[in-house]
Image (spheres, rainbow, N blue to C red):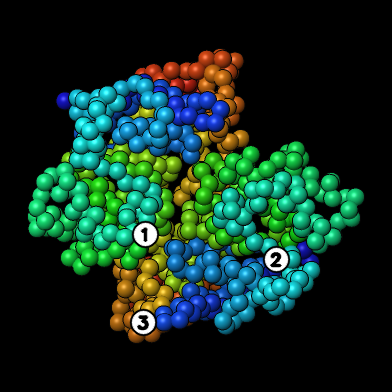
Amino acid sequence: MSALLDVSRLRVRLPTGAGFATIVDGVDYTVERGEVFGVAGESGSGKTVSMLALLGLLPPGAVVEGSASFDGRDLLRLPRRDLRRVSGRDVGMVFQDPLTSLHPMLSVGRQLTEHVRRHLGLDRHRAARRAVELLEQVRIPDPEGAQHAFPHQFSGGMRQRIAIAVALACGPRLLIADEPTTALDVTVQAGILRLLDRLRRENELSVVLISHDLGVLSSIADRLSIFYAGRVVESGRREGVLQRPRHPYTRALLDALPHPEAGDTPLIAIAGSPPSVGSRPSGCSFHPRCPYAVAVCTADDPPLVPVDDRRLACHVDPFVA
Amino acid sequence: MTTGPQPVAALELRDLEVAYEHRGRPRVRAVAGASLTVERGQIVGLVGESGCGKSSLARAAVGLLEPTAGSVRFEGGEVTPLTRRARSRELARLQMVFQNPYSSLNPRRKVGSQLADALTVLARVPRSGRRGRLAELLELVGLPATAAGRYPHEFSGGQRQRIAIARTLAADPSVLVLDEPLASLDASAQAQIANLLVNLSRELELSLLLISHDLAIVRHVADTVCVMYLGVMVETAPTRPLWDLPLHPYTEALIGAVPHADGAGFLPEALPGEVPDPARPPSGCRFHPRCPYAFERCPREEPALLRVVEGRSAACWLQTPEAPPARPADQAGRLATEGRLE
């Protein structure tokens, strides 16, 4: 069976004061049915923009190239109306801050029923029943009562559960979760990760989980892609990428993390900072910060090619087994 | 670690209470009697979930808030709340770094001019030496001297946090209180700033009170960790032993919830429930409704923060001899009698 989502050569350019800036620069990935696909990278690496581009959620003037086949249909070429139907029904989205994605003045019940009435054509009573079901599914205590409450009456973790319930309302096949636990405490984060893991198993849901936190991705992602400066530098199965990283950037990101089992060693920080959007270095974007860079790295941008159990974009490949 | 015989702690909070009152609403004790000591040159980490009172404690510690009870002593002297009158010179050596360097720096003033404020106001450095001192401050935080002529927006988040730290260093501090200084940074910048803080503390003999919700990063930075829950301290211990063997069930839950980036697909443990409303704290031990080991005594009486073994304290009824055997207390008791717990 083919992948649920197949993104190929995606390029996104956004208008800025000084011409267009390339935010996403030729990105490929696939999301299989029922899997959690992790997208990792630092802020400004193009993770979020590459997802918003699929659903036509970029600001006017954005130029999107490439293709994104969702269940056989190219999202980038769908007429606006059809795209809205697909993105409302088959794709759900969850953002970092549930306070901005939930409407502050509408009751939780109203926000849950709006979607199902519009996209699935349920009547008021059946929609209300569905809302209670959804709240039960995300483990909101007293789902009947919660329907009549407003977002501000819930804690951050509960709000994110409600936002997930809204995203699941129409029974989507793909859930895109953009930093869903970043604003939450670790104890609450663990609950949301467990919830996502259960939902994907119970509902055969595919999940794209965007996070800057490799620990979060390590918990539930089956495969992951590492983004740097608008490109994918390494992708593969979770165990391979995180246990035997091959790209110097992946390696450096892992070394920079506080490690629960490590001794009192200082953290190994990556020198410098990620390039800003307007001033990408020539060749491989990571070369100015890379301890393994050689002459070719400054001149040619390495393509993402299959190597052993993964895909890798590195001329040097210093950690080859 | 300290120079000379100095019995006075760098920063000492005793039974601190910070309460907020709004008309028509119940009184909220955000900090409900918390004590904490930062010795000279020591890095103390303060961890807890959002809403536990960490930030209120930090603000009271530097005198931005007036505590409703208890005391804050900086190098032995009382910290008085900030007023319109100038602070004493001595109190200027107690400084604070905020979470968001985007809002703590003035976007319309050059970095050098913002750093020079403290030099001008405190006038510890003669006018002629200020330029040199600016370059020195920037170098201390790993920025080039040319940074002085640029505006905050020209820097990345991590660099801005360096600038914010340099600005506090201009006051020649001996204690820094840092409220979530790493929270809004990417992993690589986070590691850079964490290492910078450790180096500054060692080089300048600075004492740090580092407030963070991220136990994993605190573990790499702090000498001692204090765990706060709903306005009170529940455990204090040197960092390594705390991590290896938490004595309070809440500390155990916090550690269990940290995800590991080892690719093993380990799902961290979720702690049931939420931090309760501080306006209506649970009876007895404030953690008992979420505690997997709670027994009859827990909802009835509030446990005090008591020394369990040398250097380690916990506020938990499980640590008393009459408690029913349960993890992690039984381990602690056993290990203590065997002398394996240091």
Q: Which residue is mark 3?
A: B283
* Vertical relation: B92 (above or below) B279: above
Amino acid type, residue under disc 2 in the picture: Leu
Q: Is residue A8 left or right of residue B12?
A: left
For badge 3, the amino acid type reads Ser
Q: Quadrant of residue A36?
A: top left
Q: Position of residue B72 (x, y in %)?
A: 64, 76
The residue that appears at 65% across and 45% down in the rendered structure is B152
Q: Earlier in the sequence, mark 3 or mark 2?
A: 2
Residue A156: image tag: 1
Determine which residue is flagged by label 2. Answer: B94
Whole-percent x and y of residue A228? 47, 30
* Label 3 vs label 1, nearer the camera: 1
What is the chain letter for disc 2? B
- The residue carrying pointer 2 sits among few (fewer than 14), some (14 to 19) or many (20 or more) residues within 10 Å by Cα, namely many
Say which quarter of the image contains residue A161: bottom left
Answer with left or right where residue B55 lies relative to residue A97. right
- Contact between labelled residues 2 and 3, with CB atoms less than 8 Å apart: no
Locate the C terminus of chain A by quadrant: top left
Q: Which mark is residue B229?
A: none
Left or right for A310, reference B37: left
A111, B260: nearer the viewer: A111
Q: Residue at x 69, y 74 (%)?
A: B83
